Amino acid sequence: MTDQTLIILGATGDLTGRLLLPGLGALLTAGHVPGLTLIGAAIDDWDDTRWRERVHDSFGAHGAAAAARSAGEATPVTDTAAAASDVADRARYLRTDVTQADDLRRLLGEARGSVAIFFALPPAVTAKACQALLDVDLPEGTRLVLEKPFGTGSAAATELNALLTRLVPEKRVHRVDHFLGKSTVLNILGLRFANRIFEPLLGNTHVESVEIVFDEDLGLENRAGYYDHAGALADMIQSHLLQILGLLTMEAPFTLEAAEFRDRKADVLRATRPWSDEPAECSLRARYTAGELGGRQLPSYADEPGVDPGRGTETLAELIVAVDTWRWAGVPFRLRSGKAIGHSRKEAVITFKKPPRVPDGLRGCDQPDRLRIGFGPDRLAVDFNINGPADPFVLDPVTLEADLGGGDLPPYGEVLRGVFEDDPTLSVRADTAEQCWRIVEPVTEAWRAGKVPLREYPAGSSGPTLPLP
C-alpha cells in the first residue's frame, strides 16, 4: 500500500486531543492505514516528545497504544495495536504558522507518500491557511480535510469552496461532519430503505411532525474560544442536525456510492427552508444562566471564562423548517440543540397522525404513535397503543425497543477511513455546505438585527421551546 501522511493543522487544540486522535487510534488499531506518518503542526512551542505523549494518551483512550505499552506484561499485544503505537512513536511535531506559505512548504517537505491535511482550526484561520497554500506546490493526490462549520455564511462558504477547488479537485475535499460517521445515524438508512414496515409511512400522509433534538447536560466545558464565536445554531443545527434531516427525508438512492447518495441528500436540502417568513415565529435563541447541573453549580454562560457577554451568543437554538418535496410538504421539522439542559436528550422523533377515527367503545387512545431514533444511548423505539391488560376496551401506551448496533469505529475513525480510502460518501459536498447556510441565513440575519430576543433559562432546566405549527 502507498505510504500516507496525515498532517494535522491545529495539533495542540481541543478537537485534536478529544476527538480526532482517539478516532485515528481506533482506525489504526482496526488495521487500517498501516505505516502512516503523523505530523502535528501549530503555533505553540511544542516538540516531538510532548506531541508524542499527546498522541499516545489519545490513542490509549481507544486502547490503541495502551495494549502495546503492556508488552512486557501478561496482556498480549496485537499486531495492529503495536502498529498504532509505532505511529505514535514516530510522530513528528513542527512549530508552524499555518497562515504562512514558507512554514506550510517546510511542513509538506516532511511528508511521505500521499498527503491528507486536516484543518483542526477555526473557520477564519482555515480560510487563511488555504489562501497561503495557493503559493505552495501540493503533492499529487493531496486531500484537504475541513472541520465544520464550513465558512461563516453562504457567501463565505461559496468563497471558501472556490478557493479549495483552486487547490485540489472537489473529490479530494473532505468536509467532515462526524455525525455522518455515527453508526446510529447511518442506521437511519437501513431502517428506512431495508424495511417495508416503516418507509411507506414516512411522509405527509401519515406523519404529523418530526423533531431532531440534541440537548446536552453539559455546559461550555472550556470551549469558549470556539463556541462563543459559533453558538448553538452554527455549531449544531446548521451542520449536524441538517445532515440528519437529509438522511430522514431523502428519497431512496439507487446505490450508496458517493455521487448518488450525496445527490439525493442535496435534493432535500435544496427543498428545505424556515417554516415562516417571520424568523420570530419559527426560531428561538436563548442562553443559560447560573443553575445546578448534575449536582454542581454552573455559572451563567455570560460569566464563563473567555466569553464576551456582549456578543450575545446563544447556547440553545431552535429552528422549525419545512421540506417542500412531494413526500414531506406540510410537515414541520423542529431542529433543536441546547447546552446545560437538565436531562440529556439526543434523538429524532417522528410523530404520526392520530387514527382518522377510533371506534366508539375504545377508550384511552390519548398518545400518538411515535418512532424514536436515539443518538445516545443508541436505541430504536416505537410507541403505540394496544388493548390494556385489565379492561380490554381501555387502550394503554406501550413501547417496543431495540438496541442499535454500534459500529467498529468511533465517528471520527469512520470519517477518517473515508479520507484515507478516497471515499467521499460521508463528506459534505460543496453545494450541500452552501445550502445549509442558505437555510439558516434568514434566521441569523434576524437575530443579528435584534428581531428575535435572546431569552434565558437556568442551567439544569429544560429550557424554552417553540410550539409546533
Image: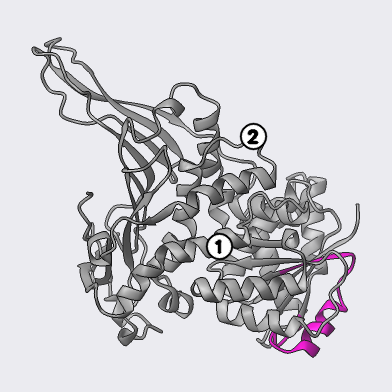
Give the magenta part as a residue range. 94-117
The answer to which image quadrant residue 407 occupies is top right
Image disc number at residue 433: 1
N-terminal-most mark, 1 or 2? 2
Q: Position of residue 430 (x, y in %)?
A: 62, 62
Q: Nearer the viewer, residue 299 or 431?
A: 431
Which residue is painted at 44% across and 68% down in the image? 234
Q: Is residue 136 left or right of residue 451?
A: right
Which residue is painted at 54% across and 36% down in the image? 189
* Residue 222 visible in this rendered orientation of the protein: no
The residue beneath circle 2 is 254
Q: How is the image coloured?
A: one colour
The answer to whether 383 is drawn above or below residue 363 in the figure is: below
The answer to which image quadrant residue 372 occupies is top left
Local secondary structure at mark 1: helix
Residue 374 in magenta stretch: no
Question: What separation in Å lies between label 1 and label 2 (alpha carbons)?
Answer: 23 Å
Mark 2 crowdedness (10 Å alpha carbons): few <14, some 14-19, many ≥20: few
Mark 1 crowdedness (10 Å alpha carbons): few <14, some 14-19, many ≥20: many
Local secondary structure at mark 2: loop
* Residue 133 visible in this rendered orientation of the protein: yes
Q: Nearer the viewer, residue 77 or 337?
A: 337
Which residue is painted at 68% across and 47% down in the image? 259
Q: Amino acid at mark 1?
A: Ala
Q: Amino acid at mark 2?
A: Phe
Q: Position of residue 172 (x, y in %)?
A: 75, 61
Residue at far front of view: 326
Which residue is painted at 77% across and 59% down in the image? 85
Q: State how many labels appear.
A: 2
